[in-house]
Image: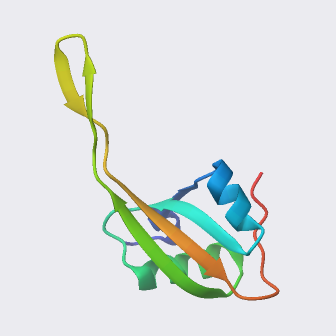
Amino acid sequence: MSNYRDIIKAPIITEKSSSLAANNVITFSVDTRANKTQIKQAVENIFNVKVESVNTVNVKPKKKRVGRYVGKTNKVKKAIVKLKEGSSIELN
C-alpha cells in the first residue's frame, strides 16, 4: 500500500459500532489486502491517536438475485480498532 488513505476506506456507523465508540472502539472498512500492522499505522498517522489493538473480520460475499440474474455482493474487511486511554476520534 503506497498511501495510508488507501488502507482506511470509511468508518462503519451502525448501532453496534456507535455503542462501542463509547469505550474507545472504532470500526472501519479497510482494504482486503491490509494486515493488522498496516491498519494500526494508518489509523495512528491519519487521526493522530495511539492504538491499543486491532481485530479484523473478513466478510464473505452474499448471493443476491434480481429477477433471473444472480450475482454476489463485494467482499469486505472490517477493522475493529481499540484506542488507548485519552485518545478519541470524532466521527460525524
Taking the image as shown, residue 91 lies to the left or right of residue 77, namely right
Total tally of numbered discs in the picture: 0
> What x and y, as percent, mark residue 24?
72, 75
> What x and y, as percent, mark residue 85?
77, 88
Residue drawn at (58%, 53%) of the image: 12
Taking the image as shown, residue 73 lies to the left or right of residue 85, namely left
Quadrant that contains the N terminus: bottom left
Residue 6's place in the image compared with 41, above or below, is above
Residue sticking out furthest to the top: 67
Residue 67's place in the image compared with 74, above or below, is above
Residue 18's place in the image compared with 81, above or below, is above
Residue drawn at (68%, 66%) of the image: 20
Residue drawn at (58%, 63%) of the image: 27
Res 19 → quadrant: bottom right
Taking the image as shown, residue 42 lies to the left or right of residue 75, namely right
Residue sticking out furthest to the right: 86
For the residue pair 79 and 62, the one nearer the viewer reads as 62
For the residue pair 84 and 37, the one nearer the viewer reads as 84
Residue drawn at (39%, 62%) of the image: 31
> What x and y, as percent, mark residue 50?
68, 87
